[in-house]
Image (cartoon, grey):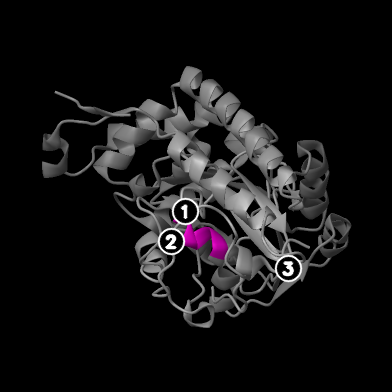
């Protein structure tokens, strides 16, 4: 029967003056800040917390921006692992994704083992002379194109993208909402940019990894001659270990992408999870409301400590602080792993706590930071 289941900081901040009940007791065995490595992505909880043996347990991962509300998946019978996926199961997943993302045909859906695997496919699918990337953003896009020898220009102003779209051989890349700053561009603005790319024979890629909770998607514009869209399953449904993601494109481009991926790009567990969760619109609406409420709670907590923050994405917020590495280290001593960026000093991303004990831990850590020596929070 089916079963259910619901980096290297440069500066160490002074220890907060607070009671033992509010703050973990540090015995001096934590790794010195300058010896703690940066991590390329979020996660890596065990590796990070190995440097903080005296931090309270369990540690909580606030570094990824993945939804803390895991979909209550009905697991398939174990027998599905004893055979290869069937064609009709893959076709049904495409149909579920097409309906969920507002597409007119399942032929526009390409399923893969997480959106990262599909990002890596893009240079093969889209021969390009140059890439114009709206950033700072998810580093996987730059790395993918650089590995293929394609030059990448990063711009920080959306107004620069229409200029880039006029140069032949250009692929424009926008993450919307953006990671890590939560910037959100309107679907209408992106529609205009896609039309400008099409007019000059170019392509626009919109990475909508966090779009399920924001409802500013350009996917319903497909099929569009210049548009490709990426969607993440694990971030929305709190099941990143399933490794499932989607590339949405015209039927012709989608067919080419599926040919590149080859047979059985998604395992049986991914097929079962996607077919079930993508059709559960009631759950998605409830999770979206829950995330928005939690985001408001998080930003209010940061306000109480005078910590500046930005972003419209529901699943995370970006703290802007000149001593972000020290703030990261401070949170780690409380068993809270957040996200700092080697190429973006002064920025720290915080995801939503998964439980009331995690919220309590974060509240204690933020209050202790605010109560620290004068000047630390400035």
- Upstream in sequence: badge 2 or badge 1: 1
Does the CB distance between marks 3 and 2 fall below 8 Å? no
Does the CB distance between marks 2 and 1 fall below 8 Å? yes
Q: Quarter holding the N terminus?
A: top left
Q: Which of marks 3 and 2 is in front?
A: 2
Q: Provide residue 271's location: percent of width, then percent of height.
A: 32, 37
Q: Is residue 155 left or right of residue 337?
A: right
Examine the structure image and report whether residue 114 is included in the region drawn in magenta: no
Mark seen at residue 70? none
Does 110 sit above or below residue 346? above
In the picture of the structure, the residue carrying the numbered disc 1 is: 20
- Upstream in sequence: badge 3 or badge 1: 1
How would you rate the neighbour count of disc 1 (Cα within 10 Å): few for under 14, some for 14-19, many for 20 or more?
few
How would you rate the neighbour count of disc 2 (Cα within 10 Å): few for under 14, some for 14-19, many for 20 or more?
some
How would you rate the neighbour count of disc 3 (Cα within 10 Å): few for under 14, some for 14-19, many for 20 or more?
some
Mark seen at residue 169? 3
Q: Is residue 221 left or right of residue 40?
A: right
The span picked out in magenta is 330-335
In the picture of the structure, the residue carrying the numbered disc 2 is: 25
């Amino acid at each position: 029967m089916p079963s259910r289941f619901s980096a290297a900081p440069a500066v160490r901040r002074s220890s907060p003056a607070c009671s033992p009940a509010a703050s973990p007791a540090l015995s001096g065995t934590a790794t010195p800040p300058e010896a703690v490595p940066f991590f390329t992505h979020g996660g890596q909880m065990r590796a990070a917390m190995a440097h903080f043996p005296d931090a309270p347990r369990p540690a909580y991962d606030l570094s990824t921006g993945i939804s803390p509300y895991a979909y209550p998946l009905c697991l398939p019978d174990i027998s599905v692992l004893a055979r290869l996926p069937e064609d009709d199961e893959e076709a049904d997943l495409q149909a579920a994704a097409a309906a969920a993302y507002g597409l007119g045909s399942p032929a526009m859906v390409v399923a893969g083992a997480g959106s990262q695997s599909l990002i890596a496919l893009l240079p093969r699918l889209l021969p390009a002379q140059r890439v114009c990337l709206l950033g700072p953003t998810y580093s996987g896009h730059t790395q993918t194109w650089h590995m293929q020898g394609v030059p990448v220009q990063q711009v920080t102003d959306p107004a620069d993208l229409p200029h880039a779209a006029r140069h032949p051989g250009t692929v424009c890349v926008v993450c919307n909402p953006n990671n890590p700053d939560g910037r959100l561009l309107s679907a209408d603005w992106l529609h205009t940019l896609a039309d400008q790319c099409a007019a000059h024979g170019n392509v626009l890629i919109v990475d909508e990894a966090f779009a399920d909770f924001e409802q500013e998607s350009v996917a319903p514009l497909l099929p569009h001659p210049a548009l490709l869209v990426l969607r993440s399953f694990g971030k929305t449904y709190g099941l990143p270990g399933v490794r499932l993601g989607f590339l949405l494109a015209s039927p012709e481009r989608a067919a080419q992408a599926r040919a590149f991926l080859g047979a059985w790009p998604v395992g049986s567990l991914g097929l079962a999870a996607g077919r079930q969760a993508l059709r559960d619109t009631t759950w998605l609406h409830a999770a979206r409301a829950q995330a928005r409420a939690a985001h408001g709670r998080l930003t209010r907590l940061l306000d109480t400590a005078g910590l500046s923050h930005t972003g419209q994405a529901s699943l995370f917020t970006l703290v802007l602080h000149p001593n972000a590495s020290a703030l990261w280290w401070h949170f780690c001593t409380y068993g809270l792993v957040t996200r700092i960026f080697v190429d973006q000093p002064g920025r720290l991303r915080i995801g939503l706590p998964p439980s009331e004990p995690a919220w309590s831990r974060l509240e204690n850590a933020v209050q202790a930071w605010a109560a620290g020596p004068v000047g630390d929070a400035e």
